[in-house]
Image (cartoon, rainbow, N blue to C red):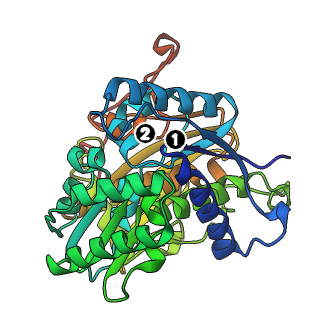
Amino acid sequence: MPSPILGILAGMGPRSTAPFVDLVVTECQRQYGARDDIDFPRMMICSQPAPFRADRPVDHTALESAIRAGLQQLEQAGAAFVAIACNTAHIYYESLCRSVRIPVLHIAELAVATLPQTSRRIAVLAARATTESDIYQCRLRRHGVAVVEVEWQTAIDELLTAIRAGADPGEVTLRWRSLVDAARAAGADTILVACLDLSARLAHAPVDVTLVDAAQALACEAVRRWRGLAAADSTERVTPSAGVEQQCAAPDVHRGEFTISTDPARLDLAAVHAFLASSYWSTGIPATTLARAAAQSLSFGLFHREHQIGFARVVTDRATFAYLCDVYVLDHYRGRGLGTWLMQTVVAHPELQGLRRFVLVTRDAHALYTRFGFEPLARAEGFMEIHRPNVYAHATS
């Protein structure tokens, strides 16, 4: 059976396409020791030239339209999900996600989530449109770190123009080093490189400044997501005796001090119950009911070190149907991209691939779930239910 297709939308600008593919290939080697040609993902690469000119204001309508067209081409070509190798494209992320049915990774959320715990003062190095959109600054502030303002946008513009024009490597290196020096002088302890045209310059940075490369974070997640989907296509792991008790041995996933695990033994059901019993959708649920539900579901625990801070549960036959429910992240940890990461892990789980229908019910989190392909019911009139919203009102634990 052919492996799933990793979709890459690039070409914005053209010189960033090949370096990003190289990052993906390197990630395959790092994550699972890929060596022979057959070990690597099938990739569908759409190099979509953007209606962008350095000496003119950005035509956002034309730019978004071009990116949307590229996404739709990848979807039609059979891509399982898409990584957009362009930071500026993510200005239109919500709208772009609504234009396709496949998941689209979010480069800014991934990059911010990979910041070292020691990073306290971040300088964002990005193209002008990305900087002005504030897609990184707002996420960094929610993450609890300071954004260092550096008067360097004109210098960045000039460096990008030099790179795109194929300038002498020595000149490019000098310009890059001057930007790093400016960030350090402004008090930054970390530079977040949010432009794929600049990623290739990282090797020339001084060692006394921490660098976080958004392109690297995107490539890392793209390979991790592909591995989860590819595992579902492996016939070697499927046995005729597979039953409810047999859970897929998916490894824990880590992001700094945070972990997502599907190991039932690790769940802190008391902590989960404390949250769900006061939630709007399962008010008063007895602890014994939750324990029984978790035991019969594919449950995902989100942990900060050993402390459980989030949860998601999927009721599924692991073949045709799944129902996502009980998704939460504790208030104190919101705004760090953890909910998105939790959902990325859920939809990439090997036991949840190839389903005919994957459903959920939400009151106010539509924007989150839309990113992963969920949409309103196409034929709501065909669905029926027995709904008892107050079933726990008189229940006892």
Q: Is the C-beta separation of discs 2 and 1 under 8 Å?
A: yes
Residue 339 drawn above or below residue 207? above
Where disc 1 sits, the SS reads loop
Kindly identify the residue that appears in the image at 54 percent across and 46 percent down. Answer: 14
Spot occupied by residue 295 in the image (x, y as percentages of width and height):
53, 60
CA–CA distance between discs 2 and 1? 6 Å
Kindly identify the residue that appears in the image at 48 percent across and 58 percent down. Answer: 294
The one of 16 and 390 positioned closer to us in this rendering: 16
Residue 178 drawn above or below residue 284? below
| Amino acid at circle 2 | Arg
Spot occupied by residue 130 in the image (x, y as percentages of width and height):
29, 48
Report which quarter residue 310 is drawn in.
bottom left
The one of 308 and 47 positioned closer to us in this rendering: 47
The one of 320 and 278 positioned closer to us in this rendering: 320
The dot on residue 103 is 1
Neighbor class of circle 1 (other Cα within 10 Å; few <14, some 14-19, many 20+) is many
Kindly identify the residue that appears in the image at 47 percent across and 20 percent down. Answer: 377
Q: Mark 2 points at which residue?
A: 371
